[in-house]
Image: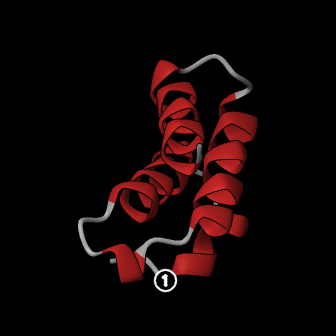
Amino acid sequence: MMPVRSFETSASVSPASAMAWRIATEDKLAWRDPATAMKAAKRAVELSGGKESAPVDTLARVYFETG
């Protein structure tokens, strides 16, 4: 699994998006980190230029999970 902070320097959309989804939806509530999930999801959308659906979907899910 990718180190949590590596999404910040990632040049690839998929790792940032996957990390955000995992952090936001983890079954173990103690492992959830809404602030980090939001940063990763926004970074994924930024990297994709908003042109890929998966990062946008992930961002929507993070917003849903964080209320």
Q: How many marks?
A: 1
Q: SS class of the residue under badge 1?
A: loop
User: Which residue extends farthest front?
Assistant: 67
Image x and y of residue 7, in percent: 61, 65
Vertical comparison of 3 with 52: above or below: below
Residue, x 46% and y 46% (percent of image)?
A: 14
Residue type at mark 1 is: Pro
- Quarter of the image where one finds residue 1: bottom left
- Quarter of the image where one finds residue 19: bottom left
Residue, x 45% and y 57% (percent of image)?
A: 24
33 or 20: nearer the viewer: 33
Residue, x 35% and y 55% (percent of image)?
A: 25
Q: Which residue is mark 1?
A: 3
Image x and y of residue 45, in percent: 67, 35
* Quadrant placement of the C terminus: top right
Residue, x 45% and y 71% (percent of image)?
A: 32
57 or 32: nearer the viewer: 32
Q: Residues within 10 Å of mark 1 (few under 14, many from 20)?
A: few
